[in-house]
Image (cartoon, helix red, strand yellow):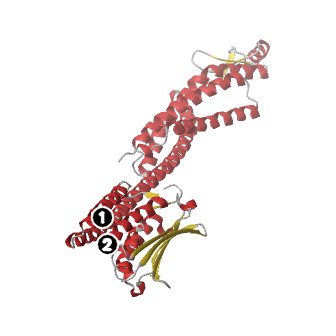
Amino acid sequence: MNRENERLPGKIVLASMVGVWLCYFLLITLRGVIVGLEFQDELLWRRALVCVIGVGVTGLLWLLLRAVENRSMGIKIAVALIAAMPGAIMIAQANRWIFDSIEAKVEQQMGKERGIALRRDDAGNLLIDLPRKQLDEEVEEAGEAAPQSVVIAPAPTPLDQWRMTFDLAIGRYFLLLAWAALFLALLAGAQARAAERRGERFRTAAKAAELRSLRYQVNPHFLFNTLNSLSALVMTGKSERAEQMIQTISRFYRHSLADDPTGDVSLEDEIDLQEHYLEIESVRFPERLKVKVDLPSELAGYKVPGMILQPLVENSVKYGVSASSKPVTVTISAREEYGRLVLTVSDDGPGTSGKHGFGIGLANVRDRLEARFGNAATIVSGPSLTGYETELRIPMVKHG
C-alpha cells in the first residue's frame, strides 16, 4: 500500500516549523521591548540566528518522527518526548555561544549606569574596580593592604555552566514539544483524510463491480430470448425474416457493447437502444407489436444507467405482446417531475396477471438503481388501467 499520500507535504511541515519559531521570536522581542533591554539591535539578529538554528533542529526532530509516523500514537509521542531533549540542549548551547559576546557589553553598560567599573579577569570572575579615594579610606580603616578590585561574582564552574545550559534547554524543550504536538495533529488529519479517500475508492470499486455484474446479467438473458426467437424463425422456414433479425441483433450488440458496463448513457441513446431491441422483436411479432416513444428534447441529454430499461421492455414483450392475440402497444416515455427524471415503460396487453414482476427483470433493475443512486431512486411496478406499467424515478444527472 502506498503511504506517500498519508504524509504531510513538505511545505506544510516547513511552514509549521517556521511558524512556531517565528512566534517565539516575536514574543521574546516584544518582551525585550517592554522591559527595556539595551542593545536591541544586536540582540535582534542574534535572536534571529538562534531561531534559524531552532528550525534546523526541529527539522531533525521531524526526520525522526517521520520514521515512525505509521506507528501507533504512543510510539510517536514517546519518540517526541525523548528526541526533543537533545535537540533542546543543542539549541541552548547555540544560544549561549551566540549571546556570549554581548554579555560583556551588558555588564559594562550596567556598571556605567551605576557609576562603577565592571570587568572579568582571565579566570572569568566578575570584578568591580573600586575608585581610588574609596580604596584609600578602606585601607586606612582596615590597616592593611586592600585589593583594587573586588570579586562580586566568581567564575561559573562546569556544574554552573551545565545548570545554565539546562535552564535554557527546558524552555526550548517545551517549544519543540509544542511543535511536535502540532505536527502529530496535522499528521493525524492527513492520515484520516487518506483513509477516507481509500475507503471511497474501495466503495467505488465495489459499486462498479456490482454494477458490472448486474449489467452482465441482462445480456445473457436477452441473448437467450432472441436466439429462441431466431430459432423459431429458422425452423418455420422464414429465412428472410431470420436474416433481418440477425442484422438487427448485430446492430443492437454493436451499440450495447460500445458502452462502459458501469457508466451512464444519455437517455436518448438508451431509448434508441430499446428501439433496436423492439425492432428485433418486431420480426417475431410483425402484426402484434406496436411501439410508441415519448421523449421530450430537453430531457434527451440527461444520463441514465446503461440498459436500465432493457428488462422492463423485455417484460412488456414477453408478458404483454407474446401473451396477447391482438396488437399491443409498448410505450416508453420520459418526463420531469419535481426535479426528478421519471421513466415509464408500459403496455396495454393482458398485464393484470402480475407475471411481469417475476424473474430477473425487475429485481435486476431495482438492484442496479440501488447500487447507482442508493435511496435517491425508486421503482414502482404493477397493473394499470390499460395493462401494465413500470415507473422509475431517478435523480436528474446531466454529466455521468
How dense is the environment of label 1, judged by Cα within 10 Å: few (below 14), some, or many (20 and up)? many
Answer with left or right where residue 173 lies relative to residue 220.
Answer: right
- The correct choice, above or below, for 161 with respect to 219 in the image is above
Q: Secondary structure at mark 2?
A: helix
Q: Is residue 259 left or right of residue 51?
A: left
In the picture, the disc for residue 245 is 1
* Lower position in the chain sequence, tag 1 or tag 2: 1
**Residue 246, how many percent across, how many down?**
28, 62
Task: Give the residue displayed 61% in from the left and 70% down from the top.
Answer: 338
Find residue 55 and report its horizontal and vertical position in percent.
Answer: 54, 32
Quarter of the image where one finds residue 48: top right
Q: Kindly identify the residue that appears in the image at 23 percent across and 73 percent down.
A: 232
Q: Where does label 2 land, which residue?
A: 284
Question: Which x, y percent locates residue 289?
Answer: 39, 74
Foreground residue among 208 and 1: 208
Q: Is residue 143 above or below residue 383?
A: above
Q: Amino acid at mark 1?
A: Met
- Asked if disc 1 and disc 2 are in contact, CB closer than 8 Å, the reply is yes
The CA span between labels 1 and 2 is 9 Å
Would you identify the image quadrant in which residue 286 lies?
Answer: bottom left
Image position, residue 396 (x, y; %): 54, 63
**Residue 218 position by quadrant:** bottom left
One can see residue 160 in this view = no
SS of the residue at dot 1? Answer: helix
**As drawn, 277 above or below 81:** below
